[in-house]
Image (cartoon, grey):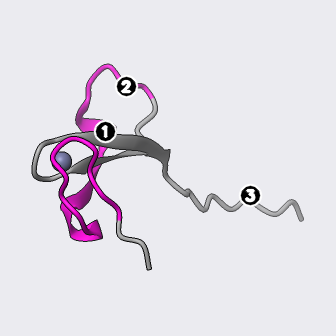
Amino acid sequence: MVEPKCPECGAVGIEHIVAQDSKEQSDTKDPHFNVAYCNKCGHIYGVFAKVVNRQTSPIW
Ligand SMILES: [Zn+2]
């Protein structure tokens, strides 16, 4: 099992990676993204698209 390690501050462990909804950023038009970052130094690991289960309405 490999633990994730922050390249900035060296924090090891997935508990140091937190994800935050990016909808609070006013200039982001699409709110369906999460920002994953280190909770010790704030290094951003990446931005991930949320999985949105949007069912298409059936056409009867
Ligand atoms: Zn860090």
Query: What are the residue bounds of the magenta stretch?
Result: 4-29
Q: Earlier in the sequence, mark 1 or mark 3?
A: 1
Label 2 sits on a secondary structure element that is loop
Circle 1 is placed at which residue position? 23
Residue 15 in the image: state x and y as whole percent: 22, 69
Q: Residues within 10 Å of mark 1 (few under 14, many from 20)?
A: some
Residue located 26% across and 29% down the image: 25
**Beta carbon at label 2 within 8 Å of ligand 1:** no
Does 27 sit above or below residue 15? above
Identified at 30% across, 57% down, the residue is 5
Disc 2/disc 1 C-alpha distance (Å): 7 Å
Residue bearing the label numbered 2? 28
Residue 30, image x, y percentages: 46, 32
Point out the tag, 3 or 2, that comes first from the N-terminus. 2
Task: Say which of marks 3 and 2 sits in front.
Answer: 2
Residue 1 at x, y percent in the picture: 44, 80
Q: Which mark is residue 56?
A: 3
Q: Is residue 48 above or below residue 17?
A: above
Q: Mark 2–mark 1 contact, CB under 8 Å?
A: yes
User: In this orientation, does residue 32 appear?
Assistant: no
